[in-house]
Amino acid sequence: MKRLLLVSFLFVLVVGCCQAEDFKFALLTDIHISKNPSAAEDLERSVAQINKASDLAFVLVSGDITEEGDCFSLHVAKDILDKLFIPYYIIPGNHDTKWTESGATCFAQIFGSDRFEFEYGGFLFLGFNSGPIVRIADGHVSPQDVDWLKSRLSANGKEKPVFLVTHYPMRIGDVDNSFDVTDAVRGYNIKAFIGGHYHANQHLSYDGIPGILGRSNLRGNDAVGGYSVFEICGDSLKVSEQRIGGTLNPWAGMSLTETYYDAETLVDKRPDIESVNRQYPDVKAVWSVQLGSALYSSPEVYKNNVYIGDENGVMSCLDVRTGELLWQFKSGNRIVGTCAVDKNIVVFGSTDKCIYGLDAEQGNLLWKLQADEPVLGAVSIDKGIAYVGASDGKFRAIDIKTGKLLWSYDEVKGYIETRPLVTKKYVVFGAWDNTLYCLDKESGEVQWTWTGGLTRMHYSPAAVWPVETGNKTVFIVDPQRAMTAIDLKTGQTCWRTRESAVRESIGISADKKRVFGKTMQDSVVCFAAKMDKPRKIWATDVGFGYEFAPSMLEESEGIVFGSTKNGMIFALDSEDGSICWKHLVGNCLMNTVYPLSGKEVIYSSTDGNVGLLRWEE
């Protein structure tokens, strides 16, 4: 096996390659169509220049087609890309799947699929999504996409030369389960991964497999943008940068006959899960069930059952003590919002634009309410009324017994993914429009809105689940790395602090005296909840590293439970913040956990696992 050599201006390739040229193709990536017209202009110019190049066979488009994942921008991109004289093959990037009012469903509706497979010149090209969906986290290739990849490689045989196209670089730090992907493909004749995300020309190695990243289509600080051109020349690959109006600038090359990896030798270090778990041997996995599809919602427990929705649109019910699968119900598309259960009725929204009510014991459909757009919001139920937001600018109150719409507030300017806070008189929720809304719980009339001076959509208090103290103060954290206390009656800011760089994960103690926040580097902090100014009570270095995933902090029996983007669940003493235990379930995003007590907690993860941990102190 030879070490990967991807070197700039490889003389042999630059000089000798064109004598045996087979075909060329272009790579467009990181296009970022938005309200700013310059991104669309850059794409128009690239398409025009590609159309002038008669020697290009096709175009790969490897993600971040839009800035905000909105359907309008995707349509703009498609209108421009459809002007190409040659075929193009496209996959989404993280901007298309995280910030998306459709729950990442309109990408496939607009472009036909979020995967592609085709063969050209004897080479197989496979492109697939590297996530995440709606949640901000590291990239993640879903279990169903890994299975698809395995099936397509198997169907084409081990000798077929293959290029794999992703948005993210396929390595730890970029994609949390990258080793699942490289392990799945290394037994085949993979020539290279091709992608973007870094907005720069780079050559990398993914567990020994070559990786090539192309520049962004955006102009950036330059006068014009550009793209990449790949040239298959006999037994070699040459990669060049094409600036708009300029000449090709070769920057890398590699042999297509040399072997840079083998199926047995692992190059990249795997996450060391056991070293953490050995520190806390009293934490045991009681059961774990693989549902076969990514889980972006949190588990909900009612009586003796666990309820959770998945990326395939399936709502599952499992026995809380054994993990036995009791029933499943299939909606029309992926479920990303956490359900709620009361009075033997499960209520949840789906990206198929419906809100469902199911019998909690049997899983039978009781009612279905149609929305105008996908329903990404988590559900809260209070006194037989379900409260849930959707992507159609509406927030609804629904009678859970009949499915009757009681009221609808229709002036939300952004899509909703949060779980609403329901108090004695009000319901409070954020949306991806920089706004926190407070509505009258009985009538749906707006009481106040709060923006806090936020100016960018990406800073919205939209992923956080708000908490409150005795019907007096609402607490949120937001992507501007601030914790804010807001008067529940007036919507006025009581205080706002960026002291601890909290992001979108918050929690409150059972006695309403302490507010918890997860910071972006290792720590959990606790603030007093009944002060007119911020007062930190404790801060604990949990050691989870750089962290930005929204997963709320939940207290039970004096223990604060939390989770991270890289597979960790932790438990802290609520009074002083001391670490009770930490446990690594895997290496991917853990959703907000559900404590059964101070000793037991139910979890779910994007790799499709739901399970029960027990602290046997």
Image (cartoon, grey):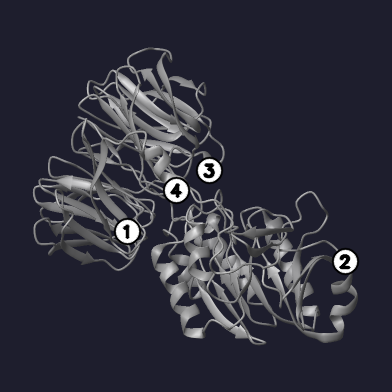
Q: Are marks 1 and 2 in contact (CB under 8 Å)?
A: no
| Badge 3 or badge 2: first in the primary sequence | 2
Q: Mark 3 or mark 1, which is nearer the start of the sequence?
A: 1
Q: How far apart in space, not on screen, are marks 1 and 3 (Cα)?
A: 22 Å
**How far is the residue under mark 3 from the one under mark 2?**
35 Å
Amino acid on which the number 2 mark rests in the picture:
Gly
Mark identifier at residue 414 = 4
Q: Which residue is mark 1?
A: 335
Using the numbered discs, state the Cα–Cα distance from disc 4 to disc 2 in whole angstroms. Answer: 41 Å
Q: Quadrant of residue 143?
A: bottom left
Dot 4: within a 10 Å radius of its alpha carbon, few (fewer than 14), some, or many (20 or more) residues?
A: many
Few, some or many residues within 10 Å of mark 3 (<14, 14–19, 20+): some
Give whichever of discs 4 and 3 has the lower sequence position. 4
Q: Residues within 10 Å of mark 2 (few under 14, many from 20)?
A: few
Q: CA distance from mark 4 to mark 1?
A: 19 Å
Q: Amino acid at mark 3?
A: His
**Label for residue 458?**
3
Pick whichever of labels 1 and 2 is earlier in the sequence: 2
- Helix, strand or loop for disc 4: loop
Out of 395 and 262, give the one closest to the viewer: 262
x then y, percent, for residue 485: 40, 23
Kind of residue at badge 4: Gly
Q: Which dot, 1 or 3, sits closer to the camera? A: 1
Say how many tags the image has: 4
The disc label shown at residue 246, or none? 2
